[in-house]
Amino acid sequence: MTHQNPVQSPEVTERMALNRRHFLTMLGLGGTFAAMSLGNLNRAEAAQHAVGLPAKPDYFSTPQASGVSSDDALARLLEGNKRFVAGKATYPHLDDARKAEAAKGQAPFASIISCSDSRVPPELIFDAGLGDLFVARTAGNIADDVVIGSIEYSIAVLGSSLLVVMGHERCGAVVAAVEGKPLPGKISLLADAIKPAVDKVRAGGGDIVDASVRENVKMTVAKLTAMGPILADYIKAGNLKIVGMRYDLDDVKVEIIA
Protein backbone atom coordinates (compact mmCIF):
# COMPACT_ATOMS: atom_id res chain seq x y z
CA MET A 1 0.00 0.00 0.00
CA THR A 2 1.36 3.44 -0.91
CA HIS A 3 0.75 6.22 1.57
CA GLN A 4 0.83 9.92 0.73
CA ASN A 5 3.92 11.55 2.12
CA PRO A 6 2.86 14.12 4.71
CA VAL A 7 5.97 16.26 4.28
CA GLN A 8 4.88 17.40 0.82
CA SER A 9 1.52 18.80 1.97
CA PRO A 10 1.33 22.60 2.41
CA GLU A 11 -1.01 22.06 5.36
CA VAL A 12 1.50 19.75 6.98
CA THR A 13 4.33 22.20 6.37
CA GLU A 14 2.32 25.00 7.97
CA ARG A 15 1.38 22.81 10.95
CA MET A 16 4.99 21.73 11.49
CA ALA A 17 6.15 25.35 11.41
CA LEU A 18 3.49 26.32 13.97
CA ASN A 19 4.48 23.47 16.25
CA ARG A 20 8.14 24.44 16.03
CA ARG A 21 7.33 28.01 17.02
CA HIS A 22 5.37 26.76 20.03
CA PHE A 23 8.27 24.56 21.03
CA LEU A 24 10.85 27.34 20.66
CA THR A 25 8.68 29.61 22.76
CA MET A 26 8.35 26.92 25.40
CA LEU A 27 12.15 26.63 25.56
CA GLY A 28 12.62 30.39 25.75
CA LEU A 29 14.34 30.35 22.36
CA GLY A 30 11.54 31.82 20.30
CA GLY A 31 13.03 35.32 20.05
CA THR A 32 11.62 37.09 17.04
CA PHE A 33 9.11 34.31 16.33
CA ALA A 34 7.62 34.67 19.81
CA ALA A 35 7.50 38.45 19.63
CA MET A 36 5.78 38.38 16.26
CA SER A 37 3.22 35.74 17.21
CA LEU A 38 2.39 37.34 20.56
CA GLY A 39 1.98 40.88 19.25
CA ASN A 40 -1.80 40.72 19.09
CA LEU A 41 -2.38 38.62 22.19
CA ASN A 42 -3.43 39.86 25.59
CA ARG A 43 -1.32 39.24 28.67
CA ALA A 44 -3.14 36.07 29.67
CA GLU A 45 -2.65 34.55 26.24
CA ALA A 46 0.98 35.66 26.22
CA ALA A 47 1.52 33.98 29.58
CA GLN A 48 0.13 30.75 28.17
CA HIS A 49 2.49 30.93 25.21
CA ALA A 50 5.43 31.62 27.53
CA VAL A 51 5.05 28.19 29.07
CA GLY A 52 4.16 26.49 25.81
CA LEU A 53 0.42 26.22 26.43
CA PRO A 54 -2.25 26.98 23.84
CA ALA A 55 -3.47 30.55 23.45
CA LYS A 56 -6.78 29.34 22.05
CA PRO A 57 -9.05 26.59 23.39
CA ASP A 58 -9.10 24.82 20.03
CA TYR A 59 -5.32 24.30 19.91
CA PHE A 60 -5.55 20.64 20.82
CA SER A 61 -8.37 20.00 18.37
CA THR A 62 -6.35 21.00 15.31
CA PRO A 63 -5.22 18.21 12.92
CA GLN A 64 -1.99 16.39 13.69
CA ALA A 65 0.95 17.20 11.45
CA SER A 66 1.22 13.65 10.15
CA GLY A 67 -2.28 13.83 8.71
CA VAL A 68 -2.92 10.31 10.06
CA SER A 69 -5.57 9.69 12.72
CA SER A 70 -4.85 7.60 15.81
CA ASP A 71 -6.95 4.71 14.53
CA ASP A 72 -5.35 4.79 11.10
CA ALA A 73 -1.89 4.95 12.68
CA LEU A 74 -2.65 1.87 14.77
CA ALA A 75 -4.01 0.02 11.73
CA ARG A 76 -0.88 0.91 9.79
CA LEU A 77 1.36 -0.52 12.53
CA LEU A 78 -0.63 -3.73 12.76
CA GLU A 79 -0.63 -4.15 8.98
CA GLY A 80 3.13 -3.67 8.98
CA ASN A 81 3.59 -6.32 11.65
CA LYS A 82 1.45 -8.76 9.66
CA ARG A 83 3.78 -8.27 6.69
CA PHE A 84 6.81 -8.78 8.93
CA VAL A 85 5.38 -11.98 10.41
CA ALA A 86 4.53 -13.34 6.96
CA GLY A 87 8.00 -12.59 5.60
CA LYS A 88 6.52 -10.07 3.19
CA ALA A 89 8.00 -6.84 4.53
CA THR A 90 8.05 -4.03 1.98
CA TYR A 91 10.72 -1.89 3.68
CA PRO A 92 8.87 1.32 2.73
CA HIS A 93 10.14 4.89 2.57
CA LEU A 94 13.79 4.06 2.04
CA ASP A 95 14.26 5.32 -1.51
CA ASP A 96 16.23 8.40 -2.52
CA ALA A 97 13.12 10.58 -2.69
CA ARG A 98 12.20 9.72 0.90
CA LYS A 99 15.76 10.33 2.08
CA ALA A 100 15.64 13.81 0.56
CA GLU A 101 12.25 14.56 2.11
CA ALA A 102 13.29 13.27 5.53
CA ALA A 103 16.33 15.51 5.47
CA LYS A 104 14.03 18.54 5.33
CA GLY A 105 11.68 17.64 8.16
CA GLN A 106 9.68 14.95 9.89
CA ALA A 107 6.06 14.20 10.69
CA PRO A 108 6.00 10.71 12.24
CA PHE A 109 2.53 9.18 12.43
CA ALA A 110 3.30 7.18 15.59
CA SER A 111 5.59 7.35 18.60
CA ILE A 112 6.86 4.24 20.37
CA ILE A 113 8.42 3.56 23.76
CA SER A 114 10.09 0.18 23.48
CA CYS A 115 12.87 -1.89 24.98
CA SER A 116 16.46 -1.37 23.85
CA ASP A 117 16.78 -5.12 23.25
CA SER A 118 18.55 -5.70 19.92
CA ARG A 119 15.85 -8.19 18.94
CA VAL A 120 13.06 -5.63 19.18
CA PRO A 121 13.61 -2.92 16.52
CA PRO A 122 10.25 -1.13 16.00
CA GLU A 123 10.97 -0.02 12.43
CA LEU A 124 11.48 -3.65 11.38
CA ILE A 125 8.71 -5.14 13.52
CA PHE A 126 6.19 -2.70 12.03
CA ASP A 127 7.72 -2.61 8.53
CA ALA A 128 8.15 1.17 8.66
CA GLY A 129 10.66 3.51 7.06
CA LEU A 130 12.42 6.84 7.40
CA GLY A 131 10.30 9.48 9.11
CA ASP A 132 7.45 7.11 9.98
CA LEU A 133 8.12 6.42 13.67
CA PHE A 134 9.47 8.45 16.57
CA VAL A 135 11.10 5.88 18.86
CA ALA A 136 12.38 6.15 22.43
CA ARG A 137 14.12 2.96 23.62
CA THR A 138 15.25 2.02 27.10
CA ALA A 139 15.95 -1.35 28.69
CA GLY A 140 12.62 -2.54 30.06
CA ASN A 141 10.75 0.16 28.06
CA ILE A 142 10.93 2.42 31.11
CA ALA A 143 9.25 5.80 30.75
CA ASP A 144 11.38 8.11 32.88
CA ASP A 145 11.23 11.91 32.68
CA VAL A 146 13.65 12.15 29.75
CA VAL A 147 11.71 9.58 27.74
CA ILE A 148 8.41 11.27 28.54
CA GLY A 149 9.80 14.65 27.51
CA SER A 150 10.96 13.15 24.22
CA ILE A 151 7.52 11.67 23.61
CA GLU A 152 5.78 14.95 24.50
CA TYR A 153 7.97 16.62 21.89
CA SER A 154 6.92 14.05 19.30
CA ILE A 155 3.25 14.71 20.07
CA ALA A 156 3.15 18.49 20.54
CA VAL A 157 5.80 19.48 18.01
CA LEU A 158 6.04 16.69 15.43
CA GLY A 159 2.38 15.72 15.46
CA SER A 160 2.33 12.00 16.20
CA SER A 161 -1.22 10.80 16.75
CA LEU A 162 -0.47 7.44 18.36
CA LEU A 163 1.75 6.44 21.27
CA VAL A 164 2.63 2.77 21.73
CA VAL A 165 4.27 1.35 24.84
CA MET A 166 5.74 -1.99 23.82
CA GLY A 167 7.19 -4.64 26.10
CA HIS A 168 8.41 -8.02 24.91
CA GLU A 169 8.72 -11.67 25.82
CA ARG A 170 11.62 -12.70 28.10
CA CYS A 171 12.77 -9.12 28.70
CA GLY A 172 16.13 -9.16 30.49
CA ALA A 173 15.40 -6.06 32.54
CA VAL A 174 12.17 -7.62 33.79
CA VAL A 175 13.99 -10.87 34.63
CA ALA A 176 16.45 -8.85 36.72
CA ALA A 177 13.59 -7.17 38.56
CA VAL A 178 11.93 -10.52 39.24
CA GLU A 179 15.13 -12.14 40.53
CA GLY A 180 15.90 -9.17 42.77
CA LYS A 181 19.64 -9.82 42.90
CA PRO A 182 22.16 -7.01 43.56
CA LEU A 183 23.16 -5.34 40.31
CA PRO A 184 26.29 -3.27 39.50
CA GLY A 185 26.43 0.35 38.42
CA LYS A 186 23.24 2.00 37.21
CA ILE A 187 21.70 -1.30 36.11
CA SER A 188 19.93 -1.46 39.46
CA LEU A 189 17.86 1.58 38.46
CA LEU A 190 16.24 -0.48 35.72
CA ALA A 191 15.14 -3.20 38.10
CA ASP A 192 13.93 -0.63 40.63
CA ALA A 193 11.70 1.01 38.01
CA ILE A 194 10.10 -2.31 37.06
CA LYS A 195 9.75 -3.66 40.62
CA PRO A 196 6.26 -2.16 41.24
CA ALA A 197 4.92 -4.21 38.32
CA VAL A 198 6.61 -7.34 39.65
CA ASP A 199 5.23 -6.79 43.14
CA LYS A 200 1.72 -6.35 41.77
CA VAL A 201 1.63 -9.70 39.96
CA ARG A 202 3.93 -11.86 42.08
CA ALA A 203 1.15 -13.40 44.14
CA GLY A 204 -0.71 -14.49 41.02
CA GLY A 205 1.59 -17.40 40.23
CA GLY A 206 2.21 -18.68 36.73
CA ASP A 207 4.88 -17.15 34.51
CA ILE A 208 5.96 -14.27 36.75
CA VAL A 209 8.29 -12.79 34.12
CA ASP A 210 5.67 -12.58 31.38
CA ALA A 211 3.05 -11.35 33.82
CA SER A 212 5.48 -8.63 34.90
CA VAL A 213 6.21 -7.68 31.29
CA ARG A 214 2.52 -7.19 30.70
CA GLU A 215 1.89 -5.35 33.95
CA ASN A 216 4.86 -3.05 33.36
CA VAL A 217 3.32 -2.01 30.03
CA LYS A 218 -0.14 -1.55 31.52
CA MET A 219 1.14 0.58 34.39
CA THR A 220 3.12 2.76 31.99
CA VAL A 221 0.09 3.26 29.74
CA ALA A 222 -2.02 4.28 32.75
CA LYS A 223 0.69 6.68 33.91
CA LEU A 224 1.04 8.36 30.54
CA THR A 225 -2.69 8.54 29.91
CA ALA A 226 -3.18 10.59 33.07
CA MET A 227 -0.16 12.81 32.52
CA GLY A 228 -0.89 16.45 31.71
CA PRO A 229 -0.79 18.90 30.24
CA ILE A 230 0.34 17.60 26.86
CA LEU A 231 -0.59 13.91 26.71
CA ALA A 232 -3.81 14.13 28.71
CA ASP A 233 -5.00 17.17 26.76
CA TYR A 234 -4.29 15.63 23.37
CA ILE A 235 -6.16 12.48 24.41
CA LYS A 236 -9.11 14.55 25.60
CA ALA A 237 -9.19 16.41 22.28
CA GLY A 238 -9.22 13.12 20.37
CA ASN A 239 -5.84 13.73 18.75
CA LEU A 240 -3.90 11.04 20.59
CA LYS A 241 -4.38 7.42 21.55
CA ILE A 242 -2.05 5.48 23.86
CA VAL A 243 -1.86 1.72 23.37
CA GLY A 244 0.08 -1.00 25.19
CA MET A 245 1.59 -3.90 23.25
CA ARG A 246 3.59 -7.07 23.88
CA TYR A 247 5.99 -8.42 21.26
CA ASP A 248 6.56 -12.17 21.07
CA LEU A 249 10.15 -13.10 20.27
CA ASP A 250 9.18 -16.56 19.02
CA ASP A 251 6.44 -15.76 16.51
CA VAL A 252 7.45 -12.07 16.01
CA LYS A 253 3.85 -10.94 16.48
CA VAL A 254 2.61 -7.97 18.46
CA GLU A 255 -0.57 -8.09 20.51
CA ILE A 256 -2.50 -5.25 22.09
CA ILE A 257 -2.68 -5.67 25.86
CA ALA A 258 -3.74 -2.21 27.04
Image: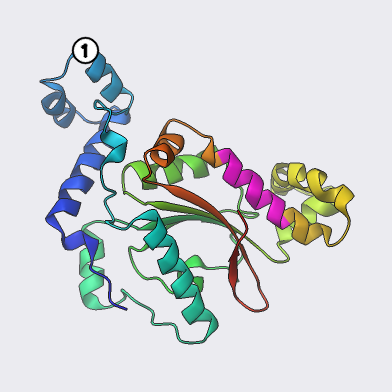
Residue at point 14%, 28% (across, down): 37
Residue 216, magenta (yes or no)? yes
* Residue 179 showing in the rendered view: yes
- Asked if residue 149 is positioned above or below residue 187 in the image, the reply reads above
The residue lying furthest to the bottom in this view is 87
Percent of width and height locating residue 240: 41, 47
Q: Residues within 10 Å of mark 1 (few under 14, many from 20)?
A: few
Work out whether 144 lies above or below 253: above
Q: Residue at x 29, y 49 (%)?
A: 64
Element assignment for label 1: helix
* Residue plotted at (20% across, 46% down): 15
State the residue at coordinates (29%, 27%).
Answer: 28
The front one of 239 and 65 is 239
At which x and y percent is residue 70? 39, 54
Q: Which residues are magenta?
A: 213-223
Q: Main secondary structure of the magenta part?
A: helix
Does residue 193 belong to the magenta stretch?
Answer: no
User: Mark 1 sits on what residue?
Assistant: 43
Tell me if 94 is positioned left or right of 171 in this view: left
Amino acid type, callout 1: Arg
Q: Residue furthest top?
A: 43
